[in-house]
Image (tube, rainbow, N blue to C red):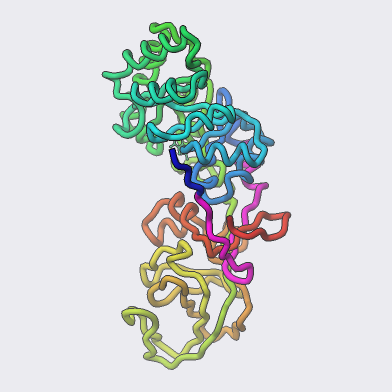
């Protein structure tokens, strides 16, 4: 088997766009969510902690009420171990030829969605601690109900001979962001059936988890022994019921400023023309850095204490802001995104402007954006 190491190019420029993460917000969100959970809280830090830094979010969540970690891939799980995190880690989505041996050697638990995956784990990583994954309504990951009883029996026979330990059963809800959606009751009852079926096969899964952020906040019947919370840790409440704290800010310095006459068209395609004489400020951040290509006339940034409209098309590397008659100077810093406490746009504002999920905004920032954590000095991306 060949191994590939994925690295991020170390190309960020601390004088350019900067993304700052506030662990205090993650801490507050974790405490709130752990307080709502009937049982334990697994902190989901996939996709680099929803763009906030997996290790930062993991450490903070574990210090404020989370008791385990969840990620998508084995590589993400091993990165947490490499950073020194010793809490239980579950990885739930991997190809059959993933490096299960390294995962198990590092004490990483694996979710198993079907017999082929279970056999691959038995062959390459004997002794693994696994969670059987039942599809509770997405037709995506997890075993189809028709295949569940035989998966449970296969797992039980492997467990009898000491080749695997079934420590958990997991499911996932498709429509938890709409608490009254009938798919939620259906998902809950399918999950309950899945647990009964596992027990009937002789399994004793002690960790049973179905709810993510939305159901943690709205549906205690779905909590079982553990909830898996990702979005909520960084401030996203998909159910729209609870005020959480945004943890990310994005700033960019003004590169240059120009005065233009009324009638001056701006940017590719000339989609915007200055209606009057005005001053334009240029920011060195574009769609390659994670800004959605603007719907003209909607996006704004905070500059000199006021919201200023983004004008013309966002290009790959740059964005133009109309600052009117404000004497803005190069080097002044615009706030593109933040918790909203200083009047800056929030991830929710971006989601509205660009018709995307806040999840997409927060996970979308590129390698040129320098990353830092509030309370420590700026570190390079990577
Ligand atoms: C991403 C994910 C979660 C976390 O969901 P949030 O809504 O972000 O809390 C939980 N379980 C699975 C299977 C996921 O893919």
Seen from the viewer's position, the closer of residues 258 and 78 is 78
In magenta segment, residue 133: no
Q: Is residue 224 above or below residue 6?
A: above
- In the image, farthest residue toward the bottom: 261
Left or right: where 151 falls relative to 249: left
For image coordinates 56% across by 46% down, the residue present is 234
For image coordinates 36% across by 84% down, the residue present is 273
Q: Position of residue 164 (x, y in %)?
A: 48, 16
Q: Which residues are magenta?
A: 6-31
Q: Position of residue 128 (x, y in %)?
A: 51, 21
Left or right: where 119 falls relative to 208: left
Q: Position of residue 170 (x, y in %)?
A: 44, 24
In magenta segment, residue 19: yes
For image coordinates 55% across by 63% down, the residue present is 369
For image coordinates 49% across by 56% down, the residue present is 347
**Where the N terminus falls, by quadrant?**
top left
């Amino acid at each position: 088997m060949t191994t590939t190491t994925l690295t991020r190019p170390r190309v960020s420029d601390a004088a350019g766009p900067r993304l700052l993460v506030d662990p205090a917000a993650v801490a507050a969100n974790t405490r709130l969510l752990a307080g709502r959970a009937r049982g334990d809280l697994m902190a989901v830090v996939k996709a680099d902690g929803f763009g906030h830094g997996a290790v930062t979010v993991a450490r903070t969540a574990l210090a404020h009420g989370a008791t385990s970690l969840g990620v998508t891939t084995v590589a993400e799980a091993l990165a947490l171990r490499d950073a020194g995190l010793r809490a239980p880690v579950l990885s739930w989505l991997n190809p059959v030829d993933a490096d299960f041996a390294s995962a198990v050697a590092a004490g990483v638990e694996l979710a198993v969605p079907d017999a082929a995956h279970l056999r691959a784990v038995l062959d390459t990583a004997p002794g693994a601690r696994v969670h059987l994954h039942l599809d509770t309504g997405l037709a995506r990951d997890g075993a189809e109900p028709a295949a569940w009883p035989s998966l449970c029996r296969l797992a039980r026979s492997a467990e009898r001979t000491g080749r695997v330990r079934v420590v958990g059963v997991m499911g996932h809800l498709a429509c938890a962001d709409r608490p009254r959606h009938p798919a939620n009751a259906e998902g809950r009852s399918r999950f309950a059936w899945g647990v009964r079926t596992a027990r009937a096969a002789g399994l004793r899964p002690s960790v049973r988890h179905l709810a993510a952020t939305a159901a943690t906040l709205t549906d205690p019947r779905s909590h079982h022994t553990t909830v898996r919370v990702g979005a909520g840790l960084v401030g996203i409440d998909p159910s729209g019921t609870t005020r959480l704290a945004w943890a990310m800010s994005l700033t960019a310095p003004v590169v240059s400023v120009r005065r233009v006459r009324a009638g001056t068209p701006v940017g590719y395609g000339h989609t915007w023309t200055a209606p009057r004489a005005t001053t334009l400020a240029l920011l060195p951040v574009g769609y390659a850095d994670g800004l959605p290509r603007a719907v003209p006339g909607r996006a704004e940034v905070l500059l000199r204490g006021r919201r200023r409209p983004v004008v013309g098309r966002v290009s790959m590397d740059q964005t133009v802001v109309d600052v009117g008659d404000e004497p803005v100077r190069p080097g002044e810093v615009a706030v593109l995104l933040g918790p909203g406490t200083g009047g800056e746009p929030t991830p929710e504002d971006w989601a509205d402007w660009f018709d995307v999920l806040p999840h997409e905004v927060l996970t979308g920032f590129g390698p040129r954006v320098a990353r830092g954590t509030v309370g420590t000095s700026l570190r390079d991306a990577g």
